[in-house]
Image (cartoon, rainbow, N blue to C red):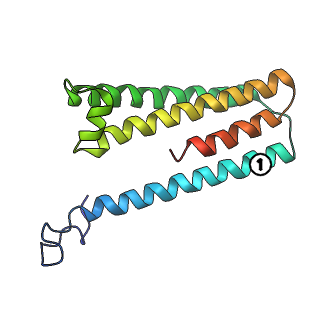
Amino acid sequence: MESRASARPADRSHPFGYGRELYFWSFVVALLIFALGAGVSAYEGVGRILLPQPIERPGVIYGVLAVSLAFEGTSWWISVRAFGAAKGDLGWWEAFRKSKDPPAFIVVFEDSAALLGILAAAAGTTAALVTGDARWDGAASLLIAIIWPV
C-alpha cells in the first residue's frame, strides 16, 4: 500500500524519490507500539510487585501463552529458514552485518525477543503458583518490559 507522499516523484531534495518514506513511518509506528507495550508491562510489573494479587484461572494464562508460543514459534521458524537461505555461506553474524535487507533479520530478532517474553511470562506465572508468591508474576512482567524493546 503506497501513500501519496511516498508516490511523489524524485526532486532535488530527494533524488531517489520518496518511496522509502513509507518504511520510515512504519518504523516509527512500530517503535511507538513497542514502547507502549513495554510501558504497560513495566507498569503492571511494578503494580504486581507492590500489591501482589494471587493468580486466578492459571489455565487461561497458560492457554494464551501456548497459543502465543505456537504463533510466534511458527513465525520465528519461517523467518529463521528464510534468513538462513538468504545468508548463503555467510555466518549468521556476518550475514546480519552485511545484509542489505533489514526486514529479513529484524523479523528473526523480533520473534526471538517475543519468544523470550512468552517464556519469561510462563516462568513468572509458574514461579508464582509454585511458591504462592505473586510477586514472581510482577518480576516476569518487568523482565518482559526490558526484553520487549530489544
Residue at 82%, 37% in the rendered image: 135
Residue at 61%, 44% in the rendered image: 146
For residue 102, what is the image quadrant?
top left
Q: Which residue is mark 1?
A: 46
Q: Is residue 7 above or below residue 53?
A: below
Q: Is residue 103 above or below residue 16?
A: above
Point out residue 94 in the picture as x, y percentages from the top left corner.
28, 33
Point out residue 34 in the picture as x, y percentages from the top left corner.
52, 52
Does the image show residue 60?
no
Residue at 28%, 26% in the rendered image: 91
Screen quadrant of the N terminus: bottom left
Residue furthest to the bottom in view is 12
Q: What residue type is disc 1 on?
A: Val
- The secondary element bearing badge 1 is classed as helix
The number of discs equals 1
In the picture provided, is 124 more to the left or to the right than 31?
right
